[in-house]
Amino acid sequence: MIKGLAITPPILGRISIGKMVEKNSKRLPEKDDQFTITSQIQNKDGWVKHPLDEQLRANAPNQKLRTIPVRMIFNDPELNLRAEYSLFDRQTGRPVCVGDGETCQRLTQQGIEQHPCPSPDLCQLAQGGNCKPYGRLHVNLDESDELGTFIFRTTGFNSIRTLAARLSYYHAASGGLLSCLPLQLTLRGKSTTQSYRQPVYYVDLTLREGVSLNDAIVQAKQIDEQSKAAGFYQEALDHVARQGYGNARFEVNAEEGLDAVEEFYVDAGEKLEQGQDLTHVQDIQKGLQQSVRVVN
């Protein structure tokens, strides 16, 4: 295996609650009140919709896609949802600093170094909105490819916190049979003072409509028994996935990083146009010592 290459679940498409639009000759993200399922192909109008989008939308109220039936491919919650604080180089999309609130990996002129991670609010390097929580949820939608996933990416605390809680709770309640539960992604909205009372949307994970938790657990046990009888080894799958994630210091590559910068790091992107970019490696070197002093 090539060292330094993160082996992540195969991605068949994307799930989003927004899109990129052209405004004043700039590409800017625009939020939406429904899901959109796309392929991994873009054209001049944006991401091309996946055939599953039309299929699911046809049965949705007012053709607004606000629930998506999904299945997890791993039992371990942390293999399905990946999340950490991430700071990207705006020009290359390469991760420069990735941390979990306790420790972080930083790209420096001497290579990748480990430092304390005090979270963006207390980190000198992260000031100006350059560092955000970056979550990636992998779910299975297409039963014809049981190990292929559609990825939902977000920098929203509401989605990350809710998804992490649900995955942990369902994992515990089902006795570790998370991959066997009938689940669905559900779009929810709420208003806060920070949103100026306007609705903000986030993603939740629930049991499918009409299925109680007890019934879901019974169903999960039956699926687990049938899978084991067929020779399927879920524990080995989780183990291999864990090894694949750990094969590289930085899980996100430059290609995904550029997409993330364009879609989620708009504020910092505007500062780049004003000559206030903080994410070039040379500039980061100047702030490293200050950041370490703040942490200590």
Image (cartoon, rainbow, N blue to C red):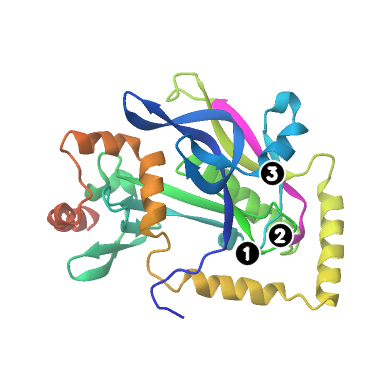
Indicate whether 193 appears above or below 14: above
**For numbered disc 2, what is the local secondary structure?**
helix
- Residue closer to the observer: 135 or 165: 135
Query: Residue at coordinates 60% horizontally, 75% vertically from top-left?
Result: 239
Judged from this view, the residue extending furthest toward the front is 44
Q: Please tell me the numbered disc located at residue 76.
A: 1
Q: Residues within 10 Å of mark 1 (few under 14, many from 20)?
A: many
The answer to which of marks 3 and 2 sits earlier in the sequence is 3
Q: Is residue 136 left or right of residue 216?
A: left
Query: Residue at coordinates 73% horizontally, 39% vertically from top-left?
Result: 55
Main SS of residues in magenta:
strand
Query: Residue at coordinates 26% horizontally, 63% vertically from top-left?
Result: 107
The amino acid sitting under disc 3 is Leu
- Residue closer to the observer: 285 or 144: 144
Q: Please tell me the numbered disc located at residue 178.
A: 2
Q: Is residue 85 visible?
A: no
The magenta span reads 178-190
The answer to which of marks 3 and 1 sits earlier in the sequence is 3
Q: Please tell me the numbered disc located at residue 52.
A: 3
Q: Position of residue 8 (x, y in %)?
A: 52, 65
- Residue closer to the observer: 219 or 8: 8
The amino acid sitting under disc 1 is Asp
Query: Residue at coordinates 60% horizontally, 37% vertically from top-left?
Result: 36
